[in-house]
Structures are given as C-alpha cells and as structure tokens.
Image: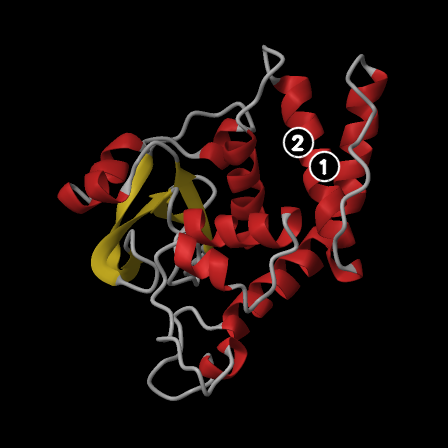
Amino acid sequence: MRKKRQEISTSILSVSGINLNAYRQDSSCLKKQIRFCPLCAEKMKTVKLWDNGSYPRCIPCEIPGETTWLDIFRKLCSECRTSFSLHPEFLLKRQRYSLAFVAAWLWAFLMNGASIRDRLFLETHSVPCPDPDPKMSWSDSLDFPGQRTRPGYQLLRYWSVLFCSRAQVLLPKLTEAFIATSGSGGSGKLAEGWLVPERARSFQLTWLHWEALWRARSPGPEIDAEKAFYQLVRFLAG
C-alpha cells in the first residue's frame, strides 16, 4: 500500500537586519541566509531546508499606505515537514502596513493615550490628512468622501482591540516568566501610574513584563526599548 502523505504545516520565519531597500534589491537574500530548520534544531538535530518556491506579496513602503509587490520565498524541512515563509522583519502577516508603523501607533496609543482620531500622530508619520475646512470639524472630515485618511481610524481601532485582546492571552505566561526571572536576581518592580483605557490594561502589563524580561537578559543596564516593543508587536501579530 502507498504510504499516506504526511501533512505539511506552515509557519513564518522572521529575519531581522533586512530593511525594505535591501529586500527590494535582492528579495532572495533570506533564501540564502536561512539554511537550517529551527524546529529540528530545538530537538538537537541539524536539518537543511529545501527551497520550496515563492509567491508574490504586497509589501508596505516607507510612506504609510503605499505598497509594492515583491516575492516571498518558502523553504521546506524534509524531517518535520514544516513549510516556512521567509519574512523580512518589517513585514507583518496579513498587514499592508509595516511593523514600524503599526508599532508606532500602538506605542502612541499605549504610552500617550492617543485617540484613534489623533491628527498629531497621523501628521507625524506622514499620513495625508484632510484639508482644513472651517465648516467641518476634524472628526467629521475623516468621514468625508475623497478625504479619508489611509489608514482610516477604523483600522487604528481594530489594531488597538486586536493587540489588547492578544496581550490578555499572553499575559499569564509572561507573568510567570517575569516572576521566575525576579526570583533569580532580576528586578521585580514594574512602573505604575500610566493612564490607559481599561481594555488596554492587559496590553500595558504585558509590555511592562516583556520589557522587564528584556532588561533581565540584557548584558548592560540599558536596553533599546523601541526594539523590545517592536518584537512584542511582531510576536502578538503572529
């Protein structure tokens, strides 16, 4: 009898250190860089990955809302039968906006209490805003046909709800890791006094625990908080 074909699971490998310009010049750079299966490495095995084709993907550019089409390459592990899509770090799954922009919005929402209709945030990040109209409020102009911003405030709200809900799921395990680190000599203190919406409280605590773990693992007293937050957003986006 013919053996039943083993089902192939799909995963994403995110690779840091590759910006859009470098990826645009050579989108196959990740295919050359990623050679071994990370899942098999956890089982003390070294298994080479096979090339497994590619597919076109809409890639976000530096200006929010602008995109370009580039290839995403895949690899396949012959041992565990996992197919990997090789994503550059700036690319988020199922998003037309970059990791930097999504993280910047969530940072403004979490740290500064930015509203989903916050004009300052949009202008700071080069998002085209409606022309001032003395007969119309800023809030109303966002709904006016032909002047809607990209991303619209509905998407900003979706991001805040999505990442808050996912942070709530992650928080218990992250708290356990934080307590374990604190017990082994790490700092057990978290910052207090932030004014955030109730639904963002889990996101706030998740970030504080995440930051504390980064500090505990850092060889020096200082960490790159922006990089740490980017990695949290990428983890929650997966």
Amino acid, disc 2: Glu
**Which dot marks residue 211?**
2
Q: Is residue 161 above or below residue 51?
A: below
Could you say which is closer to the camera, residue 127 or residue 182?
A: 127
Judged left or right of residue 204, residue 227 is left
Residue 24 position within the rendered picture, expressed as x and y whole percent measured from the top left: 18, 46
Q: Is residue 34 left or right of residue 7?
A: left
Residue 219 percent coordinates (x, y) = 59, 11
The residue at the point 25 percent across, 60 percent down is: 55
Task: Name the secondary structure under disc 1.
Answer: helix
Instruction: Name the quarter where the N terminus is drawn.
Output: bottom left
Left or right of 110 in this view: 65:
left
Query: For mark 2, does the 10 Å Cα neighbourhood hold few (<14), some (14 to 19), or many (20 or more) residues?
Result: many
Instruction: Tell me whether circle 1 and circle 2 mark residues in contact (CB < 8 Å).
Output: yes
Note whether 232 is above or below 7 in the view shown: above
Report x, y in % for residue 48.
Answer: 34, 32
